[in-house]
């Protein structure tokens, strides 16, 4: 028995290929079937094991939009080798906490457990893509849960507004699809549809295991190779480039107390060289909520203006970066009669960002960005997720020290160049939900995106 196990492990690592170099505590391996395994050695009694899949609404079409999110709901409703109760019992025995998330470009199943059980967790997560039991009874149960989730999302104006923002900015492309999908698709999903999608999308070359904690890369790689075999893909699953459309969408509802509005611009994606400068620009703009104190002592001019004059309830800048494209903009919650005043201050701040940003402004924004990036890898859970996102979106993991060095080299000239390329006199997209009577016409908004300069 010992000889057989030894021979199998020797065969596995004879064909395993190390595909990149990183810090000494991080190892990235590619198994013979194309499955990638990344481990980060951290002194911690707990380990976090993530299974990433390259699926999401961007890989779906009109008829399958929402199927990835549906499969996420079915993940632990039972496998072919064990029923739902047995799965729950095994999770309890492994002392694990399991969560899941589906975005437009990837899906992740995350488990936190004692480090000694990391290998067993890999086997449990692998069953999601190899042994998922899609019974009609369980699918009907999850269908009702998803419908309730849709009602909850429709009652959240911020989420509705950002869904509208993607739909109008990337209209006619897969990136406009909602993650949860439309109700017409959720009501008709069945076992055949889910099995066909999984057979073409949940293949080893599109999967990634990430483990962070006091774990061994040999243990994780052996468990992953044992439970995920080679699977043939019937069709090539990939997404096409997206097209940005300058436009405006508004859902007027005068019964709401506040309007939720966003102004956004087309921006480079996660793997672009301009990602860090745009992240610094976002933090230069800043954010504010009415619950904060010190309204007249904020560094950002726009934040200080809306705070001291009580113009809005909330204001925050955002940078939504997908793999090859993104949206950079400002989101704010405002009473109807203050919309024009808030927009004036926002666009004035955007012009300062493009034209008059100073060295002190850049240093402050860079320090905030460094803190934000450090928090992304704080602890095994955050670190495992950050590694997976980097590899899924740009196929490599950049150490934090290298990112800090790139940030320290940024100066006002670099920020102005990126801001002028993405913001100054560039077409914008607007989404608004609520009492939007005072929201200016699109042409007026576009006219505020430049200064007359001599």
Image: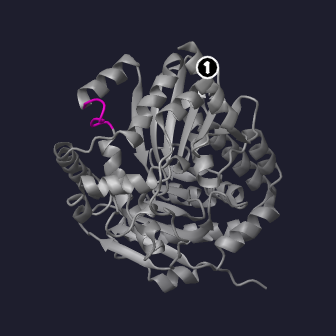
On whether residue 39 falls in the magenta region, the answer is: no
Please state if 364 lies on the left or on the right of 449 as rendered.
Answer: right
Please state if 130 lies on the left or on the right of 330 as rendered.
Answer: left
On whether residue 82 falls in the magenta region, the answer is: yes
Q: Main secondary structure of the magenta part?
A: loop
The percent position of residue 128, horizontal first and vertical second, equals: 38, 39
What residue range appears in magenta? 76-83
The percent position of residue 279, horizontal first and vertical second, equals: 65, 55
User: In terms of depth relative to the viewer, which is nearer, 99 or 306?
Assistant: 99
Question: Looking at the rendering, which quadrant does residue 431 occupy?
Answer: bottom left
Which quadrant of the figure contains the C terminus?
bottom right
Label 1: few (<14), some or many (≥20) within 10 Å? few
Residue at point 51% right, 84% down? 444
Residue at point 47% right, 33% down? 227
Relative vertical location of residue 51 with respect to residue 311 in this rendering, above or below: above
User: In terms of depth relative to the viewer, which is nearer, 37 or 145?
Assistant: 37
Question: Looking at the rendering, which quadrant does residue 16 occupy?
Answer: top right
User: In terms of depth relative to the viewer, which is nearer, 9 or 219?
Assistant: 9
Residue at point 17% right, 48% down? 140
Question: Looking at the rendering, which quadrant does residue 45 occupy?
Answer: top right
Relative vertical location of residue 121 with respect to residue 244 in this rendering, above or below: above
Check disc 1 and report the residue beneath it: 6
The percent position of residue 58, horizontal first and vertical second, equals: 46, 63
Q: Is residue 439 visible?
A: no
Residue that extends furthest to the top in the rendered view of this protein: 2
Q: How many numbered dots are placed on residues in this image?
A: 1
Q: Secondary structure at mark 1?
A: helix
């Amino acid at each position: 028995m010992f000889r057989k196990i030894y021979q199998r492990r020797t065969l596995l690592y004879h064909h395993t290929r190390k595909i990149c170099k990183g810090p000494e505590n991080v190892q990235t391996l590619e198994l013979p079937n194309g499955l990638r395994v990344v481990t980060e050695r951290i002194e911690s009694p707990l380990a976090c094991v993530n299974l990433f899949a390259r699926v999401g609404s961007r890989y779906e079409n009109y008829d399958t939009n929402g199927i990835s999110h549906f499969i996420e709901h079915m993940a632990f409703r039972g496998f072919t080798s064990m029923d739902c109760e047995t799965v729950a019992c095994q999770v309890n025995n492994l002392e694990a906490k399991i969560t899941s998330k589906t975005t437009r470009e990837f899906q992740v199943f995350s488990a936190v457990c004692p480090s000694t059980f990391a290998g067993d967790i890999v086997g449990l997560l692998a069953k999601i893509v190899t042994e998922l039991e899609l019974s009609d009874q369980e699918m009907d149960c999850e269908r009702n849960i998803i419908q309730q989730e849709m009602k909850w999302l429709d009652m959240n104006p911020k989420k509705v507004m950002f869904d509208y923002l993607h739909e109008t900015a990337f209209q006619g492309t897969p990136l406009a699809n909602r993650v949860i999908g439309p109700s017409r698709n959720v009501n008709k999903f069945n076992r055949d549809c889910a099995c066909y999608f999984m057979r073409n999308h949940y293949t080893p070359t599109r999967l990634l295991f990430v483990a962070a904690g006091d774990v061994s890369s040999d243990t994780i790689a052996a468990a992953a190779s044992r439970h995920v075999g080679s699977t043939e893909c019937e069709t090539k699953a990939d997404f096409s480039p997206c097209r940005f459309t300058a436009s405006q969408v508004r859902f007027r509802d005068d019964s709401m107390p506040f309007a939720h509005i966003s102004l956004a611009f087309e921006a480079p994606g996660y793997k672009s060289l301009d990602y860090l400068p745009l992240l610094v620009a976002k933090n230069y703009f800043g954010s504010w909520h009415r619950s904060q104190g010190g309204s007249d002592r904020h560094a950002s001019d726009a934040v200080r203006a809306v705070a001291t004059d009580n113009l809005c309830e909330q204001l925050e800048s955002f940078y939504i970066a997908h793999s090859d494209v993104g949206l950079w903009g400002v989101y704010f919650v405002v009473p109807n009669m203050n919309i024009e005043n808030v927009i004036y201050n926002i666009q004035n701040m955007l012009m300062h960002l493009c034209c008059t940003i100073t060295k002190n402004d850049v240093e402050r924004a860079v320090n905030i960005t460094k803190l934000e990036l450090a928090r992304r890898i704080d602890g095994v859970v955050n670190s495992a997720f950050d590694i997976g996102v980097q590899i899924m979106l740009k196929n490599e993991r950049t150490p934090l020290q290298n990112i800090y060095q790139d940030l320290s080299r940024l100066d006002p000239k670099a920020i102005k160049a990126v801001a002028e390329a993405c913001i100054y006199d560039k077409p914008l997209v607007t989404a608004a939900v609520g009492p939007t009577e005072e929201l200016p016409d699109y042409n007026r908004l576009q006219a505020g995106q430049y200064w007359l300069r001599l």
